[in-house]
Amino acid sequence: MIITRQKLIKEILSSLTGSKNIFLVGCAQCATLCKTGGEEELIKMEKELGAEGKTITGKSIIDPACHLIKVKQFFQKNKKGVLKSDAIVAMTCGDGVQSIADGTKDTSVKPALDSLFLGEIQRGGHFVQKCILCGECIIDKTGGICPVTICTKGLLNGPCGGSKNEKCEVDRERDCGWILIYKRLKDRGELDKMKNISDPQDYSKQIKPQKVVL
Amino acid sequence: MSLKRVLESKKFIVTTEAGPPKGTDISKMIEEARPLVGRVDAVNVTDIQSAVMRLGSLVGCHILKDIGIEPIFQLTCRDRNRLALQSDLLSAGVLGIENILILTGDHPLSGDHPQAKPVFDLDSVQLLQVVKKLTSGKDMADNQLDGKPNFCTGAVVNPSADQIEPELIKMEKKVKAGAEFFQTQAVYDIAKFEEFMKKARPFKVPIIAGVILLKSAKMAQYMNENVAGISVPDKLIREIDGAKDKHKKSIEIAARLIKELKPIARGVHIMPIGWERLIPELLDTMEV
Ligand code: SF4
Ligand code: SF4
């Protein structure tokens, strides 16, 4: 899931300078689960922007906002409201913001959220990053724990020597990724895997922007 | 004598380090380095130490070489991608800088530009492999080099890491990747270090023990709390705390540690951490 966090209202307002009529759009998937772009959040945003003198011309939640066809369907249904607005405030991830812009022609779309990471839902409201989508999954060699993501420096060949009390040198609150990998491999009797030298990552696999066509 | 030859000899190795300035005034660096000429086997030049932006290690090495000191070019994985790392290594080769020390490097978040993009394109093991490959006349992508550098390459190890097994696994990988010598994190606990040396013996690689000048009780407590693998015993903390002349005591403690390390390690690497001026006096005091 894409984890998002709402921008400060003053940041959102500064992107809306000169825009009076605002259409609010959320997302029924990730942003709803993150409590950043679901029904409740849209109602709250309506109140907050209203209090700052903005007129909300309509609000809608797309399921999901990163799906261009769904965005186009939303636009057909809400054309009148959208076209009389000065801006759409998208309470979606960065992809949603752009598909909304693409699917609604000339409307200016403003992001209300910051997109943070691809996250695992540990329980309601607790999200952690476990994969940075590096394009070349190697975690068969590391006991199923991703060093690219969990080790702050993304090292592939073992700990940097800075971990203390099993915590990372960069953030003493966070577990050292390599100690986690070491323990997992040791428990499984697979410590030999740690002894093989891992090759450098192939960053050509991460060249942006990427495209997949089935 | 080159570090390579010293490593091949039986001599007890003494290295220390110099930190390039933040700015272009190199006079202090030179002034502190001059008294070391002919007195130590080599001097490490740190590479943007602690991720605090400063003059580069390559230029620092060149300056030391100019005044007659054998430099060790510290190269971290933090700031350069594989293109820049290889290019800087070739530059070192051209400048006649033969000793390289490969480190992971502190994260930019620990330094004075926490907003910087951390690179870590290669890790220390991979970078050691690259150094070896360059000396064989090829770059990382297997392209032929027109003229190849000659290096004596070292790496670092933390002999009292809380988890010693993964540290040793990584050390073994570094040896496989081409590390010809090791310099260690500061040692204060000789018994623990001896234990480490036993475990590292099968790697058959020279290990130069780190010695940090202990400046005060406060510094010891700070290191104990924050620096991985450093545990200054209470006895030493009390000793430095009770001393009127901290400089004198600091030298006395370091000299004692070095004496105890002599039969165990291949040499010592003295890290002055701001007290560079005391190194000549320490060299006078210690018995090697
Ligand atoms: S190696 Fe890590 S970052 Fe890369 S795909 Fe696998 S889990 Fe994701
Ligand atoms: S302390 Fe552990 S997690 Fe942190 S950078 Fe070093 S190896 Fe990676």
Image (tube, rainbow, N blue to C red):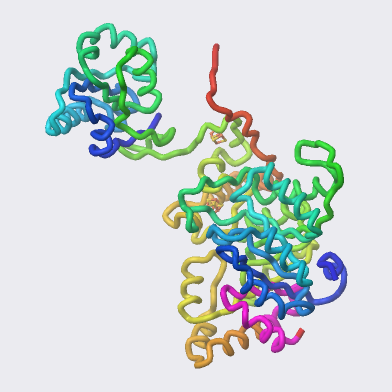
Asked whether residue A146 is in view, the answer is yes
Out of A183 and B68, give the one closest to the viewer: B68
Q: Residue at x 54, y 83 (%)?
A: B236
Quarter assignment of residue B213: bottom right
Q: Position of residue A213 (x, y in %)?
A: 54, 13
Q: Position of residue A65 (x, y in %)?
A: 34, 19
Q: Is residue B275 a member of the stretch shown in magenta?
A: yes
Q: Is residue A174 above or below residue B65?
A: above
Q: Is residue A164 left or right of residue A83?
A: right
Q: Is residue B247 a member of the stretch shown in magenta?
A: no
The quadrant of the picture occupied by the N terminus of chain B is: bottom right
Q: Is residue A120 left or right of residue A57?
A: right
Q: Position of residue A23 (x, y in %)?
A: 22, 20
Asked whether residue B193 is in view, the answer is no
Q: Position of residue B148 (x, y in %)?
A: 85, 48
Q: Is residue A211 above or below residue B279?
A: above
Q: Is residue B205 left or right of residue B27?
A: right
Quarter assignment of residue A136: top right
Q: Is residue A197 above or below residue A30?
A: below
Q: Give the extent of the magenta segment.
A: B258-287
Out of B23 and B125, give the one closest to the viewer: B23
The quadrant of the picture occupied by the C terminus of chain B is: bottom right
Q: Residue at x 50, y 54 (%)?
A: A168
